Image: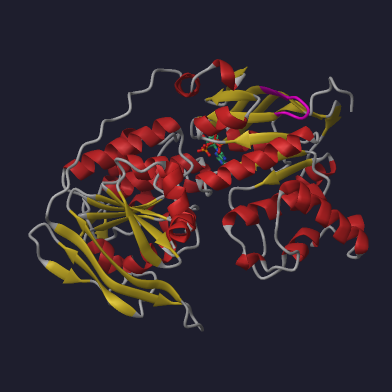
Amino acid sequence: MTEAEPAVELTGITKRFPGVVANSDVTLTVRAAEVHAVCGENGAGKSTLMKILYGMQQPDEGTIAVEGRPVRLRNPQDAIKAGIGMVHQHFMLADNLTVRENVLLGAEGLYGIGRAATARLDTLAEQTGLRVAPDTLVERLGVADRQRVEIVKVLYRGARIIILDEPTAVLVPQEVDALFHTVRDMRARGYTFLFISHKLDEVRAIADRVTVIRAGTTVGTVAPGTVTSRELAEMMVGSQLPSPHTRESAVTERPVLRVSGLRLTEEGSRRAVLDDISLTVHAGEVLGVAGVEGNGQTELVETIMGLRRASAGNVELLDRAGEAKDLTGCGTLARREAGIGFIAEDRTRHGLLLSQSLWRNRILGYQSRRPVSRGQLLDPAAARADTEAIVRRYDVRTPSVEVAAAALSGGNQQKLVVGRELSNDPVLLIASHPTRGVDVGAQALIWEQLRKARREGLAVLLVSADLDELIGLSDTIRVMLRGRLVETADPATVTPSELGSAMTGATAEEEA
Ligand SMILES: Nc1ncnc2c1ncn2[C@@H]1O[C@H](COP(=O)(O)OP(=O)(O)OP(=O)(O)O)[C@@H](O)[C@H]1O
């Protein structure tokens, strides 16, 4: 490879799906040893373009050159051979295997499984800042280390060009800094990065150049130093954004959710995943829960929703008249029917049926409620009309409400779920990462809808890894660490970095 040769050159890429042109004549040049960010609204075509570069999808038109040579990438194996690796947003590691096994699995042909393999693994671990013993089980690793194992895995297979798909979505600020440090280090060693992100501040911090995609086509490539985050966002949406909101409080004295002494133990072990959790959320209040993934937030939400059974404690919901209902023994559907809306952390597991049309997904969880049902009978016409209203209000980009949920981009699926959950007039909303994967425009829209619902008296339990979101929306923030609520922070004064320290237990250790 000569210095002048670009690492990747995508020329005239077009990819059509039924009713949608996902990429239309896209051109993207990534220089060797640069960090190149790709930004765009939900559904703009970023994932499709990356899937094409990783051989997961075939373009209808266009050419790909890697390090100056034209290539045909029929599958990920072809891409790996060409030196391209992808770190997906959802990690693809086997939890019950060790770091070493995960890295070597399926790549034994490269360095064998003996000394040469160990030496290679050690070098890569060092280069990527992975500081765990190779025989550690992956299930024992935190999110940031798992991500490093994924990076080591693609490097081991010979990747020189690495696609990072929203790598920071699951990290706390300190971990983001550490990841960026590693990326800069690796860039200095000649590695090239493609970086997909909706967080424009991060893009500005790490990227050498940014290519903006709008509605499937390239709007332009800029050096981030020459534009503000706002200008970048405006390039993405093609118009001016609304201004951020000022803080306002709608908190009332009326409790809506009362959780007391909640305890959850892991199957087959006595370790408490949730340890004596008590909290109250009032009408008009957003209670934010901050925590590093794996500290019990997921379990807390799932226990409140009846997806897991607590070993002790109570969950009580109070209706608008103040009438309390004990939900402790109830199933999920009964809880929904009592007035809880639920934005699940994993929309494909608890939120959507991907093979089903959008309007059928509108009915999910609300089978016996108007307007989508009359008594025990579904009302497809009403469900369609209501879904169309959600699509308009939440700006879900789709050719129609008849297409399968799988055909929507990730962010547009998320908008549909949020729209559905808020459309049922809940008294309480349990929102896990409500804007994960959505672009800044859609994020502003979802925040606005949440604030509006709060003004009208909605109680919200918000779990989010996006600390700006947590600080911006919450009236109170509780920090969760190893299954307990350990600290309370005031969103009016706390900084993301202080919150990050509390989440990792650093503050508590300092005080001790
Ligand atoms: N398998 C598919 N079948 C039909 N349409 C698809 C398919 N995959 C993507 N699309 C459509 O292609 C367009 C681009 O989607 P893509 O996932 O590339 O967007 P994106 O920029 O990655 O969005 P997001 O930020 O929401 O992840 C969208 O309109 C989407 O609905």
Above or below residue 510? Residue 457 is above
Residue 30 image point, x, y percent? 72, 26
Residue 8, quarter of the rendered image:
top right
Residue 322: image location, x then y, percent? 9, 62
Residue 178 part of the magenta segment: no
Q: How is the structure coloured here?
A: secondary structure
Residue 472 shows up from this direction: yes
Quadrant for the C terminus in the image: bottom left
The answer to whether residue 314 is above or below residue 155 is below
Q: Where residue 61 sits: x, y (%)?
A: 71, 27
| Location of residue 299 in the rendering, given as x and y in whole percent from the top left corner | 42, 66
> For this view, does 385 lie left or right of residue 438?
left
Quick check: 40 left or right of 387? Answer: right
Which quadrant of the figure contains the N terminus? top right
The image shows a total of numbered marks equal to 0
Place residue 182 in its image quadrant: top right
Most foreground residue, 412 or 353:
412
| Left or right for 441, reference 504 | left
Residue drawn at point x = 42 percent, y = 48 percent: 499
Image: magenta residue range: 27-34
**Residue under the point 66% across and 37% down:** 50
Looking at the image, which residue sits at the far left? 321
> Residue reaching furthest top?
226
Q: Is residue 279 above or below residue 311?
A: above
> Residue 204 occupies which quadrant of the picture?
top right
Along the viewing direction, whichever of 452 and 184 lies nearer the viewer: 184
Mark yes or no: residue 91 visible: no
Q: Nearer the viewer, residue 451 or 44?
A: 451
Ligand 1, what quadrant? top right
